Image (cartoon, rainbow, N blue to C red):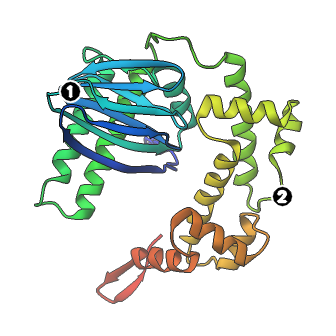
Amino acid sequence: MKRFVSLPVVDSSLYLFGGHMRTVPGGWQFFEQKHQMFELMVVVDGRQTTEIKNLITYDYGAGDAIIISPGTVHTNQNSSLDQSMTYICFHFNIENLALKSEIIGKIANTVISSDQPIAKSAVRTAKKMVAYSANHSLSKEQINLKIQITVLEFFYDLTEELRDYKAHKKIYYSENEAKTSRQIATLIKRNIEREEVKSFTFGDVCQKIGISCGYGHRTFKKVYGITPLHYIESQKYNKAKMLLGSPERSIEDVADLVGASSVSNFSKQFKKWSGTTPSKYQRQMKQKRRVRTVKGSGYFE
């Protein structure tokens, strides 16, 4: 019998922004802030103080790491008034809800000490990202790919380490809340994955599970760090990108298949998601799919 190995369908969306390495003087402090994505920060040299508003203040040093969860109000400052400090940070978002939930439930908003494998992996990842960004022998595309590979390897390390990780804080959500949130995510994803998205609301999803919209909203955000509406929109965006990448699909077809009320509204929403129009995105995808052959050009599948 010939050997057959099925390869999984991979649908991944990784977004990184605001990454940098910086050396700051003694007495430095950064204003109160919060983000809609995770923030990973590692200290390279010196000590930093991070205050999680209305919760706790941490003082940590070289080799230590912290991941701030979405929506967390916090401040950062150099712990020393006269010694400099060097740190590396970047913000990230991932589509993997299970990993998001694990991060929020076990390690977010707490310092991971330098002797922990997760902290070592975080420091290694951050330093690699800086090295690739400063490597002028690489093209912009190569730098982006190298950084993506490095961050994905970090996420893999997280999935390995979080399995048996003993959290040093109370789990942020209950098992029942995690179960409810998984049900909500599954129903939303199932609705979006239909060939044609039929009109549905978050209220419809909650009614099917037998919970109130208020409880569903609070629980989903607690477990995954994003609102249900944000998740619905991200799933529609992913579907729209996939459909626009097919040469046979018109923008009108795509708008209809993602449940948009009109082509105009779809175009506005897609530009809000991606920063570009559906027609421009589709042209870019067609250009990427075009290949040159001996006989001319064509499209590959």
Secondary structure, mark 2, is: loop
Displayed quadrant of residue 186:
top right
Q: Position of residue 29 (x, y in %)?
A: 31, 35
In this image, 175 relative to 73: left or right? right
Question: Do the residues bearing badges 1 and 2 touch, measured as CB atoms within 8 Å?
Answer: no
- Residue at the spot 45% in from the left edge and 42% down from the top edge: 5
- Residue at the spot 67% in from the left edge and 16% down from the top edge: 174
Name the kind of residue labelled 2 in the image. Answer: Ser
Residue pointed to by mark 2: 199
Secondary structure, mark 1, is: loop
Residue pointed to by mark 1: 81
Q: Quick one: label 1, few (<14), some, or many (20+) residues within 10 Å?
A: few
In this image, 147 relative to 13: left or right? left
Residue sitting at the far left:
137
In this image, 180 relative to 143: left or right? right
Q: Earlier in the sequence, mark 1 or mark 2?
A: 1
Q: Nearer the viewer, residue 264 or 290?
A: 264
Q: Nearer the viewer, residue 272 or 22?
A: 22
Q: Position of residue 147 (x, y in %)?
A: 28, 48
Q: Position of residue 93 (x, y in %)?
A: 47, 44
Q: Rounded to the nearest whole Å, what is the CA distance between mark 1 and mark 2? A: 57 Å
